[in-house]
Image (cartoon, rainbow, N blue to C red):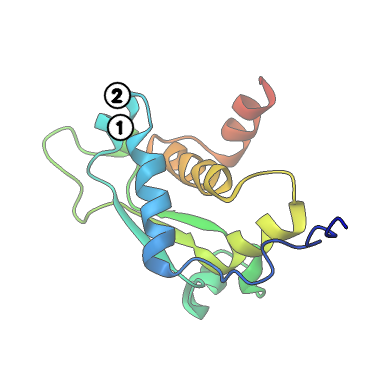
Amino acid sequence: MSQTPDPAPWADQTAPTLDAFAALARAAFDALPEPFRSAAGEVVLRIDDFADDETLAAVGLEDPFELTGLYHGVDIGSRDGLGPAAEPSRIFLYRRPILDEWCERGDIGLADLIAHVLIHEIGHHFGLTDDDIDAIEGED
């Protein structure tokens, strides 16, 4: 007698913790080609469940699930050539919205989605706009 396969083998799994999520983000960063990794090396990576209310208001959003990542800092093309930025550049990845998108899409692995959001935010660190990034992604 054959056993019916479990229709949801992941049903007893839990979402990755903030630390596990950070490990996936770090692995994505470490996998970047060397010229990009070096140029982005000073960026501080932070993982939070959601953006805070002040951040959401600053970007014109009300629903915290609409923001998966955010670059905060002075992009490297706009810095004074005489020294580093006044404060460190930071990339925020928001765990819950990324998990939500991952579940809704169902067509991409979680590590790949985290890498995609991270690379998008690194693009802002390099001075690219959302339109620039969309155009680059459209070339694939």
Residue 42, image quadrant: top left
- Where disc 1 sits, the SS reads helix
Q: Which of the 4 quarters of the picture holds residue 46?
A: bottom left
Tell me: residue 121, above or below residue 131. below
Residue 132 on image: x %, y %: 58, 31
Residue designated by label 2:
34
Answer with left or right where residue 42 lies relative to residue 106: left
Residue 61 horizontal side relative to residue 55, left or right: right
Q: Mark 1 — residue?
A: 37
Label for residue 16?
none
**Which residue is more in the foreground, 7 or 107?**
7
Return the residue found at the far front.
1
Q: Secondary structure at mark 2?
A: helix
- x and y percent of residue 23 in the render? 36, 54
Q: Judge from the rendering whether residue 78 lies leftward or rightward of residue 52; answer left or right.
A: left
Pointer 2 with pointer 1, Cβ within 8 A? yes
Name the outermost residue toward the bottom.
53
Vertical order, 100 against 69 (above or below): below
Q: Residues within 10 Å of mark 1 (few under 14, many from 20)?
A: some
Disc 2 to disc 1, C-alpha distance? 5 Å
State whether residue 124 is above or below residue 94. Answer: above
Residue located 37% across and 33% down the image = 31
Closest to the observer, 65 or 14:
14
- Total count of labels: 2
Which of the image's four quarters has the C terminus?
top right
Q: Amino acid at mark 1?
A: Arg
- The residue at 66%/55% (across/down) is 102
